Amino acid sequence: MTKVRWNPLKQLPALIWLKTYNKSTLHADAMAALIVTIMLIPQSLAYAMLAGLPPATGLYASILPLLAYALFGSSRTLAVGPVAVISLLSANAVGLAHLTSGLDVLTLSMTLALLSGMLMLLMGLLKLGFIANLLGRPVVTGFITAAGILIALGQLKHILGIPIGGHNLPELAHGLIEYGSDTHWLTLLIGVTTVVFLWWARAPLTHFLCRFMNKTTASALSKMAPVSAVIISILLVSNLALDQQGLKVVGHIPSGLPTLAWPTLSWLLISTLMPSAVMISLIGYVESISVAQTLANKRRQQINPNHELLGLGAANMASAASGGFAVTGGFSRSVVNFDAGAQTPMAGIFTAIGIALASLYLTPFLALLPKAVLGATIFVAVLTLIEPHEIKFTWRYSKHDFLAMVITIGMVLFVGVEAGVMAGVAATILLLLWRTSRPHTAVVGPISGSEHFRNINRHDVEQCEQVMALRIDESLFFGNMRYLDNQLNTLLSQNPCLEHLVLVASGINHIDSSAVEGLIELNQRLQDKGIKLHLSEVKGPVLDRLARVNFESQLTGHIYLSQHNAWKDLTTSVGNAKAS
C-alpha cells in the first residue's frame, strides 16, 4: 500500500473553494468585505499606534497579509490583520530591542513579523498544529484578560493627553500619578465622549435600531460606529482648528501602496527577537485557531491546524515584506465578517483591495484624526477581551486551573506580558505534574445483581475481605509510583486477611518502564506476604507493551479481561478454599 504524503502546495484550501466559486458567493463576499473594510480602517490605524508605529503601517499590515492568508489558510471566514494583543506584544518586544540595538522600531517590527512568519511556516510544514495545546485555556484567558487591562490603561495617555508609558501596571500607575495633573481637558473631552459613544453603539444602539429594522442590519450599522467617530472628529478638528488648541492628531500619512522589501536579518536581531517571535507565534496561532474553529463549527466546516499555521505564517511574512508588523486572526473582525455573510476567503481579498484604495486616496483626510479617538477605539475594543464570567467559571470548576490563571494575570500585570505567559505555562505544567503524581484510586466492588463495579465509599456494593479490587484512575509513570506504594501500604495494613489484590487498569492509558519495574517489585513484596497480584481491564496498547517484557509470566496472579471475571473467579476460589 502506497503511503500518501502531505503536500501543502497540492492541497491548498484556495484550490478547493475556488472550484465552486460563483456569482452568488461573489456578491456575499463583496458585501462582507465592504463592512469589514470600513471597520478595519480605524482599527488598523489604532493598532499601529498601539504597536508604537506610524499609522500607515496599520494599513500596510492589512493588505498583503490578507491575500497571503486567503491562499494558504483553511478558514472560510477568518479576518486576518492587526489585533490588540499581538500589537502589544510587538510593542514590548520592539521597545526592548530598540534600547539594545539602536535600530528604528519599524525595522524591528518588520523583522519580528518575519521571524514569527517563518516560525509558523516551519511549524506548519512539520505538522505541529497540536503545539497550540501547550497553552491551556486558563493561561490564554488569564493572559488576554490581563493584556486587555494593560492595553486599556495604556490608552489613557491618548485619552488624557499626558506622556505616560510602561509595560506593566506599576509603571502605568506611576505615570498616571506623576502626570495626571497635566491632563489636557480638550483631549479628555474628545476621548471620553468617543468612549461613551462607542460603548453605546455596541449594545444599546443595536437594541434601539432593532425597533425599526432587522437585527442583522441593526448590528451592521452599529459596527459602523468607529468610522462615524473618525469622520465626526475629523470634521470637528478641520472646522474648529482644534489641533491648534493642543489636541494631538495623527498627522501626515503618506499616500500610496507599501514598497516591497525584506528586512535584513542578522544574528544579533535574530537572537534578540526570537524569544518574542516564539511568543507571538504561539499566542497568535492560539487566538486565531480558536476564532476560526468557533466560526467553522457554526457552518459545519473543517479547520486544518497545519494549514492555519501556513496561512498565518505567510500572512506575517507578507506583512514584513510590505512594511507592516505582526498580524493574526482577529475576533471582532472575524465575527463581523461571518455575520455579514462572507462565504470564502475571497472576502479577505476584497477587503485588502478596499484597504489599498484607502491607502491611495483617503490618507490626506486622516491626517486630522485625533489620537484621542484612536485611543478610545482601542480602549473600548479591548474591554471585550476581559471575561469575568470565564474567570468565575474556572474558579468554580477547578481551583488548580484558577491558580494558573491568577499567576498568569498577576505576572502580566506586575511584571510583563512575556513573563506572564511563561509563568502561566510553567504553573500549568507543574500543576499537571502534581496532579498526575497523586493518582486518584478507589477500592471498588460489584453492585449486587450486576457486573458494574463502583467505589465502596460511594455505593452499596459486595465486598470480600480476602479479595480487594483497586481501580487506578491515572497512567503510571516514575512520578507517581511512590505515592501509589504508600496508598497500597495503608490498604494492606487495614486488610490483614487479604489474599488477592486486583489492580483495575481501566483508567491506565500508559505505563512507563519505571512503573513496570515498580509493579514487578510490588508483585514480589506481595508474594512475600502471601498475597497474589492480578490485573484486570488492561487496555490493548498497554497490554502489548507489557507483553514485550513477559510481564504476565512474572505475575503471581493473572491478567483478566474484565473485572467481573476477576471477581467471580477469585471469590469462587476463596470460597472453595474455605469449604475444603
Image (cartoon, grey):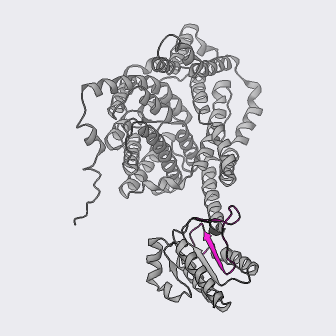
Q: Quadrant of residue 91?
A: top right
Whether residue 327 appears in this view of the structure is: no
Is residue 67 visible to us here? yes
For residue 157, which quarter of the picture?
top right
- Whether 463 is among the magenta residues is yes
User: Can you give x and y, in whole percent of width and height, for residue 364 in the image?
Assistant: 44, 18
At a point 48% along the width and 49% down the height, the residue shown is 281
Q: Residue 523: horizontal and vertical position, in percent? A: 60, 86
In the depicted structure, whether residue 488 falls above or below residue 580: above
Q: Quadrant of residue 482?
A: bottom right
Left or right: 435 as drawn, with respect to 495: left
Above or below: residue 171 compared with residue 139: above
- Describe residue 184's horizontal placement relative to residue 301 as left or right: right
Quadrant for the N terminus in the image: bottom left
Residue 24 vertical position relative to residue 512 in the rendered view, above or below: above
Q: Is residue 541 left or right of residue 147?
A: left
Asked whether residue 356 is drawn in magenta, I would say: no
Which quadrant: the C terminus? bottom right
| Region of the chain picked out in magenta, as a range | 452-478
